[in-house]
Image (cartoon, rainbow, N blue to C red):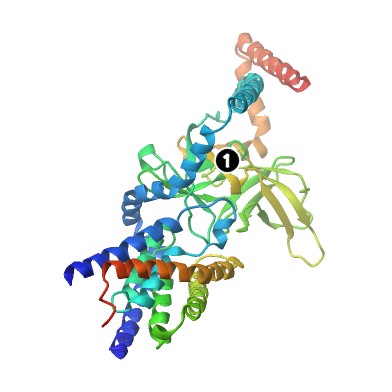
């Protein structure tokens, strides 16, 4: 039991770390704006799959790491990420029984709303403008999410096959 | 079970939300986490290098597969450009010398050249809401906050945060950045504020009848004490003096291509505050009543010894000639 849970613990945090590195990677001009925020996608995968292990705190810590990595004001990404996780946790009671396309629509919407929290946080003390990239990155997030979900869940089942039974 | 976890999610979110609001407040208004940020960013440096690695590896591979012919061509081109720039420099040296002599005549402080250091932009994503880039120089190279950054085209921005071996540059076209400029053609002072669009600046608070034209070159005035004076900043691209506007709407385009930055130069100003203050004083003295004063001084200086006077006049004559020469060429 302990070995299994350490394994899944490692898997969760390794995947978040990789996603963080990926999300600060700069891609050639223009493409970067349309790509989803991987860290946020990965956290949402874990929240949907194993809400008992991954909760608001996980989202918050990931967001804080994001703040440090990007050099934004501390707490902005943390607030937005924990808000997204909170929405998934509380607003969708029967999310376990959703099909994959439904899930990706939910995730896309949540990311879209989360981007506005991000924008609002930044707006508190500075002039910022919203552009359509918010919409595009939410859309690409919704498209990418199922693949990441399937990939991570199969990895998770490899490591701890029985834990999901409850 | 479901219910309990829902409850705890609510409580957790309330806690965490409050915590992040407090963090946002503390970080933005009181700047409490500067040291923490410095240390954490220093520890994170390897992560930045990992993130930077794929693109730079791809670039390296690209370099390696270039043909000999291409490289030879480029080498020839570069040599040609180098010799051209050397020729320009020949003239520049004499101009600098003239400038020094003239400034001495004028009792203005002589401008020194600055210590410089090259830096490379790291391909790392930064704050999506501001125009910043990360460079591969940090506190261990002596980089400090507020340091001016230029490249071969013009002023790029200033350093806003420093870690051990990386630092972040705020570009001049960020919405929260302004730079004092002078119109090169007629010396009108203005402030160029960023718009958040990467290649656009706006000149704010200018009356509608101000003498600025499309195509005017804006150079830094050095009044803010951060940027050295005399470096090109932007060129005016749009001037709107419609009736009904309170101020003229003037747009300018930064000379440095801020969206395609690769290499830049960090400048170290020698004792920046004092020098600019002295300079301002000198300029204001000169512009008001003091031309006569200066003249008197020079006359007084030149009267006692005949040698001195001849030196001065001879020097200035030479200067004029050399300036004329360089213009002819």
Where in the figure is residue A51, as x and y percent of width and height? 33, 78
Quarter-of-image position of residue A155: bottom left
The residue singled out by tag 1 in the image is: B280
Question: Image quadrant for the C terminus of chain B?
Answer: top right
Observer-nearest of B40 and A7: A7
The reply, left or right, for residue B126 in relation to residue B233 is: left
Where in the figure is residue B297, as x and y percent of width and height? 62, 25
Look at 71% across and 16% down and name the residue there. B317
Observer-nearest of B210 and B165: B165
Where in the figure is residue B88, as x and y percent of width and height? 66, 23
Residue farthest to the left? A2
Residue B50 seen from this side: yes
Quarter-of-image position of residue B90: top right
Where in the figure is residue B112, as x and y percent of width and height? 52, 29
As helix, strand or loop, the secondary structure at mark 1 comes to helix
Residue B268 seen from this side: no
Look at 56% across and 65% down and name the residue there. A128
**Within 10 Å of the Cα at label 1, are there few (<14), some (14-19), or many (20+) other Cα atoms?**
some
Question: Image quadrant for the N terminus of chain B?
Answer: bottom left
């Amino acid at each position: 039991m302990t070995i299994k849970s350490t394994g899944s613990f490692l898997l969760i945090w390794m995947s978040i770390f990789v996603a963080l590195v990926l999300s600060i990677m700069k891609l050639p001009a223009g493409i970067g704006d349309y790509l989803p925020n991987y860290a946020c996608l990965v956290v949402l995968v874990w929240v949907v799959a194993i809400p008992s292990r991954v909760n608001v705190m996980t989202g918050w810590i990931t967001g804080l790491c994001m703040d440090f990595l990007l050099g934004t004001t501390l707490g902005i990404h943390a607030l937005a990420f924990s808000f997204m996780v909170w929405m998934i946790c509380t607003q969708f009671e029967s999310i376990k029984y959703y099909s994959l396309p439904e899930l990706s629509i939910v995730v896309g919407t949540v990311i879209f709303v989360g981007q506005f929290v991000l924008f609002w946080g930044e707006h508190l003390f500075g002039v910022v403008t919203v552009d359509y990239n918010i919409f595009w990155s939410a859309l690409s997030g919704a498209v990418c999410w199922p693949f990441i979900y399937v990939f991570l869940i199969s990895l998770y089942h490899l490591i701890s096959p029985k834990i999901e039974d409850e | 079970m479901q219910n309990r976890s829902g409850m705890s999610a609510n409580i957790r979110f309330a806690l965490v939300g409050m915590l992040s609001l407090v963090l946002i407040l503390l970080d933005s208004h009181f700047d409490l986490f500067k040291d923490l940020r410095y240390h954490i960013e220093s520890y994170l440096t390897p992560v930045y290098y990992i993130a930077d690695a794929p693109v730079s590896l791809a670039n390296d591979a690209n370099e390696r597969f270039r043909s000999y012919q291409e490289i030879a061509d480029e080498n020839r081109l570069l040599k040609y450009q180098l010799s051209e720039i050397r020729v320009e420099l020949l003239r520049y040296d004499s101009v600098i010398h003239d400038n020094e002599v003239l400034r001495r005549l004028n009792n203005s402080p002589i401008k020194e050249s600055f210590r410089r250091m090259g830096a490379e932009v790291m391909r790392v994503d930064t704050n999506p809401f501001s125009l910043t880039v990360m460079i591969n120089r940090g506190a261990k190279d002596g980089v400090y906050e507020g340091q001016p950054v230029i490249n071969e085209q013009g002023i790029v921005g200033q350093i806003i945060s420093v870690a051990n071996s990386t630092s972040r540059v705020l570009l001049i076209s960020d919405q929260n950045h302004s730079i004092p400029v002078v119109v090169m053609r007629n010396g009108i002072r203005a402030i160029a504020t960023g718009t958040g669009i990467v290649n656009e600046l706006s000149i704010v608070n200018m009356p509608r009848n101000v003498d600025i034209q499309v195509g005017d070159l804006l150079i830094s005035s050095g009044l803010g004490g951060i940027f050295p004076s005399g470096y090109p900043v932007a060129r005016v691209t749009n001037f709107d003096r419609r009736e009904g506007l309170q101020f003229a709407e003037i747009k300018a385009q930064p000379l440095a291509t801020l969206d395609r930055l690769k290499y830049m130069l960090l400048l170290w100003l020698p004792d920046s505050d004092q020098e600019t203050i002295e300079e301002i004083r000198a300029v204001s003295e000169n512009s008001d009543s003091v031309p006569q004063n200066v003249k008197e001084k020079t006359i007084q200086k030149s009267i006692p010894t005949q040698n001195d006077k001849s030196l001065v006049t001879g020097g200035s004559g030479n200067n004029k000639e050399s300036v004329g020469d360089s213009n002819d060429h």
